[in-house]
Amino acid sequence: MPDVEFITLIDRTYRWFPPAHERDSIGIDLPNSHYDPDLGQQILEEVVAGAQRAERLGFDAVSFFEQHNTPLALIPNALTGAAWVAAKTSGIKVAAIGPLLNAYQSPIRLAEEVAMIDTLSGGRLILGLPLGIGAQYHSMGTMSPITARARYREAVALLDKSWKTEGPFAWEGDFFNIPYVNPWPKPRQSPHPEIFIPAAGSRETIELAARYNYTYQAVLTPMPVLLKNCQLFRDLRAEHGYPDDPRKIAAVVSVHVSETDEKAREELERYALWGVQNIIRFQFHESFPPGHVTETSFRAMMDGGYRSSDPSTLTWDQLNAGGLNGSAATVTENLEKLVSAMGAGRVIIAQEFTVPMWLQEKSMTLFAEEVIPHFRPAGALPTWQRERYQGYRTQTELIGRNPRRAGHLTVGIDGVYEPVSDRDFD
Amino acid sequence: MALETGAVVEKLDVRGTEIAYRRAGDGSSLLFLHGLGFSKRWWPLYDRLAQHFDVIVPDLPGFGDSPQAPWMSDFDDMVLVLAEFADAIGAGRFHLVGHSFGGWVAAEFAAFYPERVASLVLITPLGARVPGDMPVDLFRRGAQGRLELMVGDRAAGLFPSATQEDRIERLTRDYLDLTGFGRLAWNPRYDIRLERRLGRVNVPSLVVGVEDDKVLPASHIDAYAKMLPNSTVTIVRAAAGEPTGHGVVVQEPEALAAKLMSFIGEK
């Protein structure tokens, strides 16, 4: 039986904006006059409610992305979202698949923010480091698509070193020159939280994930390409001397579970079609600003390798090609085939971002009760219930773990320096 | 009439950076810096100018037949490589003409090397900051959309290659040109340093505007005129039909050449 970790994507779309045929871009300049603070609050609270439900149901982790200038999702910094969600939950892991390194002036600021959230959440943070989508360069004002990849790679190298090397040390890079790299605090998880690298298939990105022993978050591409990429990733890991580890491959899939396959379609079809017709409609030059891809990749895309068909014309049968919308039995069977083929030990479950909460609750409950147990060792506990909580929970545990806590101040009084402790008052 | 005549492409290695250029005519040197979408070609305007000058038209690094220059991070890099290019082809002091993005580069060059510029002509130049009145976002237009903004309905006639060339080749070349442009002009989309630096440029300068620029607001012509201490402004008008636009270089070569020759000839 495979042992798979389930991460559920809890993003929600703010959907009160004009349909695709009445507007231009959704990712750059859809006027925010369409935004209403009450409806926005509702969306963000649904995200938090989704996290609490996932914890109660026994998922291993919740995740969300980072979006900008768009109603697609309303979390503009995945780490800020993680801080709130971690505070509103107690055990489930929180995967912030978002902070754009290129939106930060220095990756060390990110290192410190990650460490703070990881510490206060008791080591529950998972960090995703996407390069970012093309449209975001237009709105961020801080990053250039021309230098984005090179700057991103240097930022990852610096971030990784800042956690694996004791500070202070100096960094002399092309993009960052930091004389004293010395982040405080440091993460609760040692040396750092699990890191996911979302990759649609660029070899460069897969190589990066392999080199640093990070998790390859395999954004769905046609199956033969996907399987080839998974094998490439395993081979590259082996070259770097890392053992085979299914947890390092995370499949990303859309799932909806109902009583029967027919009922699943009846419940989901309208939301799924609305999504492809209204959301995934970026114009090419907005998704691929200059420099975002190499000349070779660009030629390949122009030669038909990219979106030879308009995604907005997708039909239910095409959307459900993987057979992951259906009865629990259907979903279990097809999911098992997929994770076996990919060698994936993690699955990120994406639900349609607009499905009503009651329907999502039904689907997620069925998934937790009837699908997840099939992919877990006996007892069916989520990983966070199997692993030791990393923070301390009581004062006695703190004292027990930390003898150096006492006698930590040396104070000069009348020219005599003596160690004092908090107990010296009595 | 073939509007895109094939001039011989020559290539120069500037310390590892290949710069392609085209050159014709005799007389004092005139360096012409192309705009976005106007590289890789020898336009009729150049022929007119070549009747009076030694016209040198490089494809800026990252544009046309000149490969990307990944080491280039700012306009000063562009200016320095152009200075080396000019040295290498034996152009010490020259008339400098730039169009659109090339106008921006020409302004930067003049700020660094005013002594090398005999006269400066900026044709519908990008690069100035006019708050609230900025150019169209060229990064949000496809290749065809940009062409139409610049030359209007005459796009197909003026750019036969746009319809004749292999589609993949044409789109790839456009993407690379846009990458060369973005390398310097993605953000910010102006250079506020010009506001002080152009005060150094006391050479005779001409800022050329058009009748109906769908890319660059007319306020930018005035902004450059204000920054350049020894400048005049002229507007190129269409002989007939559609008014002149951002791509005046290819729309009205006769009228534009006459303006340039009259201005430079006086100097």
Image: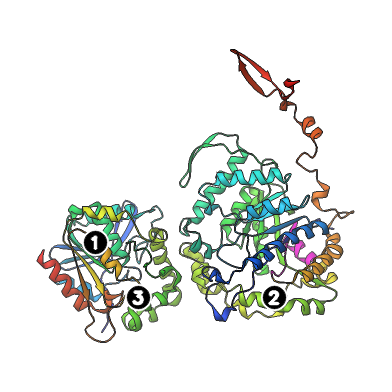
Residue where numbered disc 1 is placed: B226
Q: Nearer the viewer, residue A144 or A417?
A: A417
Alpha carbons under labels 3 and 2: distance apart: 40 Å
Nearer mark to the viewer, of 1 and 2: 1
At 73% across and 20% down in the image, what residue appears?
A424
Does the CB distance between marks 3 and 1 fall below 8 Å?
no
Find the residue positioned furthest to the bottom. B241
Amino acid at dot 2: Ala
Q: How is the image coloured?
A: rainbow
Amino acid at dot 3: Lys
Residue A137 appears left or right of A75: left
Disc 3: CA contacts within 10 A as few (<14), some (14-19) or many (>=20): many
Q: Are marks 3 and 2 on the same chain?
A: no
Q: Position of residue A197 (x, y in %)?
A: 63, 55
Q: Chain of mark 3?
A: B
Find the residue positioned furthest to the top. A415
